[in-house]
């Protein structure tokens, strides 16, 4: 029997929050887009997130079958992500109370990110419900990419969730491999389920018209979309810009996390030292749908992330017909077909990045051909296909006995 209701957990960031600001990013887009697609397919979705602002209603109806439930836990204010593990118990108890009074009988728990997984792990046993886990990022993979010092207990927390999850969703085959190799995940409980893109919003359009709407006629335009933090590699994009004449770099996004403000200051100083301050335009985050015009307006989209589990920016740019130059890491390898739909760069040498970008800037026919192939290829990904497959997977889980923690 098809699954009818799912409780989605997104403790540390709300699907209604602005992507590109604070902790809002690709996960916000993922949770909101997938919940919306499931709701339209007839699955009632409630997304549980932490209340952060006074005046937030306890329940927000986004559309029929899709609600966001703001759960009180800790101060009614933004809390650094690094401090949220201390609120997991309080959030779990509050969420349990909300579940028992919300009027829906959930059949599946879907946790997004390891913090939500900690909550779902406990609720799974309390409510005897199957648990689906999507990690979005993995501590051991991030540490390999940027030598980051992760929150104490995160690796063990991820390991515990993996051992007890009835289903683990990986965005790519590479992520599935990391789950097996680094965490010992059972391959029979891993499904590769890529995110999607909304082709009604992200589609090719007229570049000149997009630039006119944005009020930035520009010349040769490079684009970076994302949160400003060391992981995303904006510094490399600025260093590549310094090697390219007569191009400007638009950055759409704001500082994120504890290192965000310092990273923004460092990038501005780097631009000044390299003499490209007048060619670097840092713009505040935009509502998600407005990004389509930025993709259309750009000649090339840069994705220089040090690690990337999937890479929604690369996919959205591709859907808009804009060629992508991306780091050859993680999920970006599954989105960008090197030499066909864009270019992948091994390593972090600014000159190599500049050479790849200049190739597309100087060869308009090549860039147009790559953009067209990228747009056509993006049809492999859509939120409705992702939701349809997840619905089938959850329906199968409902018929099974939940996994016992190993």
Image (spheres, rainbow, N blue to C red):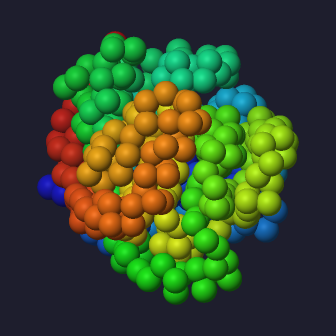
Say above or below: 345 vs 224.
Answer: above
Q: Nearer the viewer, residue 116 or 15?
A: 15
Say above or below: 167 vs 283.
Answer: above
Say above or below: 84 vs 19.
Answer: above
Q: Residue at x 45, y 45 (%)?
A: 356
Q: Nearer the viewer, residue 334 or 372?
A: 372
Q: Position of residue 367 (x, y in %)?
A: 37, 62
Looking at the figure, which quarter contains the C terminus? top left
Q: Is residue 219 left or right of residue 40?
A: right
Q: Is residue 292 visible?
A: no
Quadrant of the rendered image containing residue 345? top left
Say above or below: 50 vs 232.
Answer: below
Q: Is residue 196 visible?
A: yes
Q: Is residue 398 left or right of residue 232?
A: left
Residue farthest toward the left in the current orientation of the protein: 1
Q: Residue at x 52, y 86 (%)?
A: 209
Q: Position of residue 1 (x, y in %)?
A: 14, 55
Q: Position of residue 50 (x, y in %)?
A: 66, 49
Q: Position of residue 59 (x, y in %)?
A: 60, 66
Q: Residue at x 56, y 30 (%)?
A: 349
Q: Is residue 333 left or right of residue 217?
A: left
Q: Residue at x 67, y 41 (%)?
A: 239
Q: Is residue 388 left or right of residue 125?
A: left
- Number of marks present in the image shown: 0
Q: Nearer the viewer, residue 31 or 263?
A: 263
């Amino acid at each position: 029997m098809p699954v009818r209701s799912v409780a989605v957990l997104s403790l540390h960031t709300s699907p209604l929050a602005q992507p590109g600001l604070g902790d809002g990013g690709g996960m916000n887009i993922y949770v909101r887009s997938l919940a919306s697609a499931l709701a339209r397919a007839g699955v009632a979705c409630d997304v549980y997130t932490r209340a952060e602002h006074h005046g937030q209603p306890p329940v927000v109806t986004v559309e029929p079958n899709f609600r966001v439930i703001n759960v009180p836990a800790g101060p009614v204010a933004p809390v650094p992500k690094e401090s949220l593990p201390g609120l997991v118990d309080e959030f779990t108890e509050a969420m349990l109370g909300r579940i028992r009074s919300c009027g829906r009988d959930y059949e599946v728990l879907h946790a997004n990110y390891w913090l939500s997984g900690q909550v779902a792990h406990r609720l799974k046993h309390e409510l005897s419900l199957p648990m689906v886990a999507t990690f979005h990022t993995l501590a051991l993979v991030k540490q390999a990419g940027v030598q980051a010092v992760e929150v104490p207990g995160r690796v063990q927390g991820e390991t515990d969730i993996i051992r007890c999850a009835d289903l683990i969703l990986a965005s790519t085959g590479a992520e599935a491999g990391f789950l097996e190799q680094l965490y010992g995940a059972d391959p029979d409980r891993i499904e590769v389920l890529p995110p999607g893109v909304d082709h009604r919003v992200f589609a090719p359009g007229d570049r000149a018209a997009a630039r006119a709407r944005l009020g930035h006629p520009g010349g040769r335009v490079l684009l970076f979309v994302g949160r400003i933090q060391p992981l995303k590699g904006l510094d490399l994009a600025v260093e590549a810009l310094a090697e390219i004449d007569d191009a400007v770099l638009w950055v759409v996004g704001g500082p994120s996390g504890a290192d965000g403000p310092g990273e923004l200051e460092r990038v501005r100083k780097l631009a000044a030292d390299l003499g490209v301050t007048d060619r670097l335009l840092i713009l505040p985050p935009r509502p998600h749908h407005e990004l389509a015009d930025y993709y259309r307006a750009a000649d090339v989209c840069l994705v220089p992330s040090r690690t990337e589990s999937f890479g929604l920016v690369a996919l959205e740019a591709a859907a808009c017909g804009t060629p992508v130059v991306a780091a050859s890491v993680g999920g970006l390898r599954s989105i960008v077909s090197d030499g066909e739909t864009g270019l992948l760069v091994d390593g972090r040498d600014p000159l190599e990045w500049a050479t790849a970008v200049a190739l597309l800037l100087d060869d308009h026919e090549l860039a147009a051909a790559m953009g067209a192939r990228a747009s056509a290829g993006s049809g492999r990904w859509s939120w409705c296909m992702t939701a349809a497959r997840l619905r089938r997977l959850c329906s199968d889980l409902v018929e099974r006995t939940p996994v016992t923690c190993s």
